[in-house]
Image (cartoon, rainbow, N blue to C red):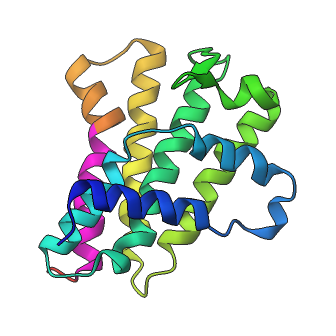
Amino acid sequence: MHSPDELRALVEEALGALELWPQLQGQAESVRYSLSVGGKRIRPVICLATAEAAGARAEAAMPAALALELIHTFSLVHDDLPALDDDEERRGHPSTWKRYGEAVGILAGDALQAEAFRLAASYPTTRVARELAEATLGMIGGQWLDITGTGDEVTLHKLKTGCLFAAAVGLALWVAEVP
């Protein structure tokens, strides 16, 4: 089994080598930028560690782990937009929309989400993509609670943050074929 730091390094390497869909054209630059501005990569590390603990190889869970990171990054890119939090910086760097413009920022988030589902769909079972979709929808529901000021704070955080953490474990268990 790998240490968390080793898993994080594997995630960084895999993100750097990620082959984006060629039809993205110049949009790929903003997608790569969004992924390059750092982060702890907690969700993919949890996914890989869980897969290893369940008897699978980390490499087998890497597409699922990357899909989680792409969904998380998509949510941050969209969250930074003027229509939501209007953040001009993310992790000490210009936010994607601030660097490339609002329209390109929206498309970067959209592309990250689509790439995540392309990775999730690479598994022979549809359960990985379904679990990722359900977690993403929960996260979006949490974002809605946040921007509308409705709902209680526990539910907001459970959805906005907790859904992807739960999916990190769930995806790993599907990959490891744990019933």
* Residue at position x 50%, y 63% in the image: 13
Measured as percent of width and height from the top left, residue 111 is found at 68, 52
- Residue occupying the far bottom of the picture: 124
Task: Name the one closer to the observer, 127 or 108.
Answer: 108
Is residue 168 visible to the viewer in this orientation of the structure? no
Q: Quadrant of residue 21?
A: bottom right
Closest to the observer, 154 or 3: 3
User: Looking at the picture, how far across and down is residue 24, in whole percent?
Assistant: 81, 59
Q: Position of residue 168 (x, y in %)?
A: 29, 57
Query: Which corner quadrant holds the C terminus?
Result: bottom left
Locate residue 53, reporting x and y percent: 12, 71
Q: Can see residue 14?
A: yes
Q: Quadrant of residue 6?
A: bottom left
Which residue is at 43% across, 88% downward? 124
For the N terminus, give its image quadrant: bottom left
Q: Which residues are magenta?
A: 162-176
Query: Total of numbered circles in the picture?
Result: 0
Secondary structure that dominates the magenta span: helix
Residue that appears at 30% across and 45% down: 163
Q: Does the magenta portion include 31?
A: no
